[in-house]
Image (cartoon, rainbow, N blue to C red):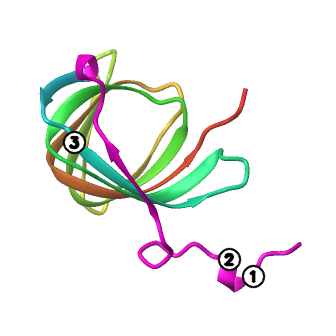
């Protein structure tokens, strides 16, 4: 069956599922990185999702198992890899976190982003 306009997920309009997130204590390196995600869409396979995420200042270890497109709406984040490379993103920046990325994620100023993520089933 084909989809209709009424099937569209519109960020900010479509009802969302709210998830309160906090990294495991052993992954937190600094601050109190409490987070909230409002998931507006998940496909029937459970592999693709999209919504809004917001995070408080802090630093924690990350290990991305999914590919995630991020469009930063507010704040500043710094992503660091295991080799010491780093990249700073500010409101308006868009980037993709590839599956397999291991390093740290730092929220310097309270951040808010749009996300779309895909996690392949193995």
Left or right: 104 as drawn, with respect to 10: left
Give the secondary structure at mark 2: helix
> Which residue is depicted at the point 15% across and 36% down?
58
Residue 119: percent from the left, percent from the top? 61, 38
Relative image position of residue 51 (x, y in whole percent): 46, 60
Write down the residue under mark 3. Answer: 34
User: Which residue does the numbered mark 2 point to in the structure image?
Assistant: 7
Q: How many numbered tags mark residues here? A: 3
Marks 3 and 2: in contact by CB < 8 Å? no
CA distance separating discs 2 and 1:
5 Å
Q: Which residues are magenta?
A: 1-27
Q: In front here: 74 or 50?
A: 50
Tag 2–tag 1 contact (CB < 8 Å): yes
Residue 57: say if magenta: no
Location of residue 9 with respect to 29 vertically, above or below: below
- Please tell me the numbered disc located at residue 4: 1
Q: x, y percentage for residue 95? A: 42, 49
Q: Residue at x 68, y 76 (%)?
A: 7
User: Around disc 3, counting alpha carbons within 10 Å, would you say few (fewer than 14), some (14 to 19), or many (20 or more)?
Assistant: some
> Which picture quadrant has residue 104?
top left
């Amino acid at each position: 069956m084909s989809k209709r306009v009424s099937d569209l997920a519109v960020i900010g309009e479509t009802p969302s599922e709210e998830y309160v997130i906090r990294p495991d204590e052993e992954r937190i390196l600094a601050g109190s990185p409490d987070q909230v995600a409002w998931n507006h869409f998940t496909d029937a396979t459970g592999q693709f999702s999209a919504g809004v995420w917001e995070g408080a200042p802090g630093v924690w270890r990350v290990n991305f198992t999914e590919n995630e497109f991020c469009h930063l709406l507010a704040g500043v984040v710094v992503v660091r890899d295991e080799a010491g490379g780093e990249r700073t993103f500010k409101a308006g920046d868009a980037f993709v976190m590839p599956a397999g990325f291991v390093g740290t994620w730092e929220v310097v100023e309270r951040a808010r982003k749009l996300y779309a993520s895909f996690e392949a089933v193995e």
